[in-house]
Amino acid sequence: MKKYKMFIDETILCHLNASDKPNMMANTMHLWKQFQKDLYKIYLLHDTAQTHKAALSQIQAELVTPHIGILSLAERFVELDIIEEKYMDDCINIASALVLECDFFVSWNYKSIVNTKTIRGTKIIAMLEDYKDIIICTPTMVSAMKQA
């Protein structure tokens, strides 16, 4: 069975303990349990990992330090008006996932990641720059795909 590659952003780690958002927390915990079973190959930015060491000690994850190729790809999101420059960290996250040829990018960030403009824009950048397409989704969507 293929082990899918998933890139997660900080919103996933923040929702492991988000009692003010019980549904999101429950969906994140469900996915986290699958991470603990090592069902996916997990990636995240090194900087994100530094602030969430306790949670990340529960799973196997590869930490990514952005290099010039990732940073220049991230700039394409701003150049093509897909994501605003003030959200450059989100651009770097998505660019990292593309460069690593991840299957999924999982986030709760609806403002600048899990939205139609970014999803479509990421497909365009992947095609223009000759990267594999990636599925941008929430933990809830990952669970739904697994059941389908």
Image (spheres, rainbow, N blue to C red):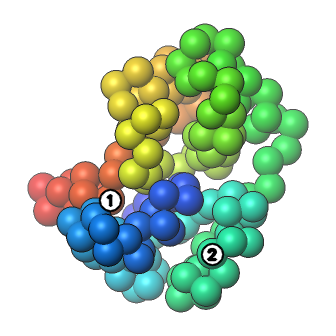
Classify residue 107 as left or right of residue 8.
left
**Residue at the front extreme of this rendering:** 20
| Residue 92: quadrant of the picture | top right
- Looking at the rendered image, the quarter that the N terminus falls into is bottom left
What residue occupies the far right of the structure in this picture?
Answer: 68
Percent of width and height locating residue 13:
50, 68
The residue under label 2 is: 52
Residue 108 in the figure: left or right of residue 46: left
Please say if 118 is above or below 111: above
Q: Nearer the viewer, residue 21 or 74?
A: 21
Residue at image location 28% in from the left, 64% down from the top: 21
Q: What amino acid type should be assigned to the residue bearing mark 2?
A: His
Q: Is residue 63 visible?
A: no
Q: Residue at x 37, y 71 (%)?
A: 18
**How many residues crowd mark 2 within 10 Å: few (<14), some (14–19), many (20+)?**
few
Q: Secondary structure at mark 1?
A: helix
Q: Is residue 58 visible?
A: yes
Is residue 145 placed above or below 81 in the rendered structure? below
Q: Marks 1 and 2, Cα distance to the nearest angstrom?
A: 18 Å
Query: Which sits in the foreground, 18 or 72?
Result: 18
User: What element does badge 2 sit on?
Assistant: loop
From this viewpoint, which residue is outermost toward the left?
A: 148
- Indicate which disc residue 3 carries: none
Q: Amino acid at mark 1?
A: Pro
Horizontal and vertical percent position of residue 112? 48, 33
| Camera-nearest residue between 117 and 61 | 117
Q: Which mark is residue 139?
A: 1
Residue 46's spot in the image, x, y percent?
74, 63
How far across and down, in percent of the image, does residue 42 sit? Answer: 54, 66
